[in-house]
Image: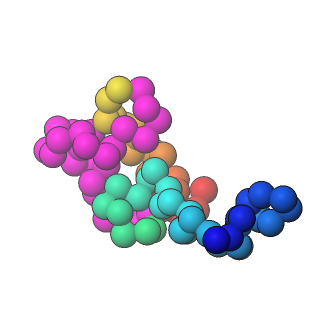
């Protein structure tokens, strides 16, 4: 039995998985791109349900969320 994380024995590097995708990755493919922008626009306009598009957590999918996704997709 290993005593990991006790008595100075840390968890191995990378233990616990990878970094979660950014909140702006609405389709869950690991990157923020034009596909995520389209999802944000659809959710903000009511074309599809607001399931992942509330990036700023204000309780609504709207133009502010779309702008956040666009900025991330453009690397801003």
Q: Quadrant of the C terminus?
A: bottom right
Residue 44 in the magenta stretch? The answer is yes
Between 52 and 11, the residue placed more toward the observer is 11
Q: Quadrant of the N terminus?
A: bottom right
Q: Position of residue 59 (x, y in %)?
A: 35, 26
Relative to 11, is 40 on the left or the right?
Answer: left
Asked whether the viewer can see residue 34, the reply is no
Relative to 15, is 61 on the left or the right?
Answer: left
Relative to 48, is 30 on the left or the right?
Answer: right
Q: Please report the bounds of the magenta region as a residue range.
A: 32-58
Q: Position of residue 63 (x, y in %)?
A: 37, 37
Quadrant housing residue 11: bottom right
Q: Position of residue 39 (x, y in %)?
A: 27, 54
Quadrant housing residue 54: top left
Considering only vertical position in the picture, is 59 above or below 73?
A: above
Residue 29 in the magenta stretch? The answer is no
Relative to 11, is 70 on the left or the right?
Answer: left
Which residue is at 32% across, 29% downward?
A: 60
Which residue is at 25% across, 43% downward?
A: 51
Asked whether the viewer can see residue 26, the reply is yes
């Amino acid at each position: 039995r290993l005593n990991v994380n006790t008595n100075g024995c840390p968890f191995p590097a990378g233990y616990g998985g990878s970094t979660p995708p950014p909140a702006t990755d609405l389709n869950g493919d690991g990157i923020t791109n034009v596909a995520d922008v389209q999802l944000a626009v659809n959710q903000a306009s009511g074309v599809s349900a607001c399931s992942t598009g509330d990036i700023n957590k204000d309780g609504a999918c709207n133009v502010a969320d779309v702008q956040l996704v666009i900025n991330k997709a453009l690397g801003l």
